Amino acid sequence: MVHPYVEGWTTLLEWFGQEPTFHDAEILSLSLKRHGVSELKLHGWITTNDVDPDGYLILDRHAVVTFSVEQIMDLQLDGFSAQNVIGGLRLQYAASRGRTYYFALPEGPDDIEIELLPCYGLDGYIRAKKVAVSFIPGRPINLD
């Protein structure tokens, strides 16, 4: 597990009050840059066990979460839609995927991987040397 070593992760855990799975989170944007900081922004929340009057689970602790990614080594992304919902997000030490020949930088034991589990639209993974997390509490105000 890489989480404790990712800048901003502890603060995000404090906000959510538990480890977020990002189940059904919506990807708001993905900006990839050859040099500098790339960003993955998503709308996440915690699903409670409480039910509203219509029988739906109540979602709490909404936040716009930004994963700032530096020195991308490899990525593989699939799908894209007007709405991109993920089944979950894994933030972990990078796994071997048999793609070493794609790496833009030398492989290392501290490489980090963001894996976007499929649901609807965009999914895949990003492997990088550095990932930091920040967030803005609340729902997204403008989706453009």
Image (cartoon, rainbow, N blue to C red):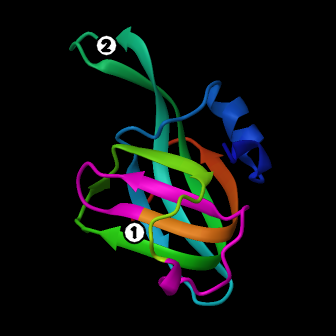
- Asked whether, in this view, residue 82 is left or right of residue 27, the answer is left
Q: Quick check: 109 above or below 65? A: below
Instruction: Report which quarter residue 18 is drawn in.
Output: top right
Residue at x 57%, y 60% (from the top left corner) = 113
* SS of the residue under disc 2: loop
For badge 2, the amino acid type reads: Asp
Residue 37 is situated, as x and y percent measured from the top left of the image, at 66, 77
- Asked whether, in this view, residue 36 is left or right of residue 7, the answer is left
Residue with the mark numbered 1: 144
Q: Quick check: 9 above or below 62? A: below
Residue at x 51%, y 47% (from the top left corner) = 90
In the rendered image, the quadrant that contains the N terminus is: top right
**128 and 7: which is toward the camera:** 128
Residue with the mark numbered 2: 52
Query: Mark 2 or mark 1, which has the lower sequence index?
Result: 2
In the rendered image, the quadrant that contains the C terminus is: bottom left
**28 and 96: which is toward the camera:** 96
Q: Is residue 11 magenta?
A: no
* SS of the residue under disc 1: loop
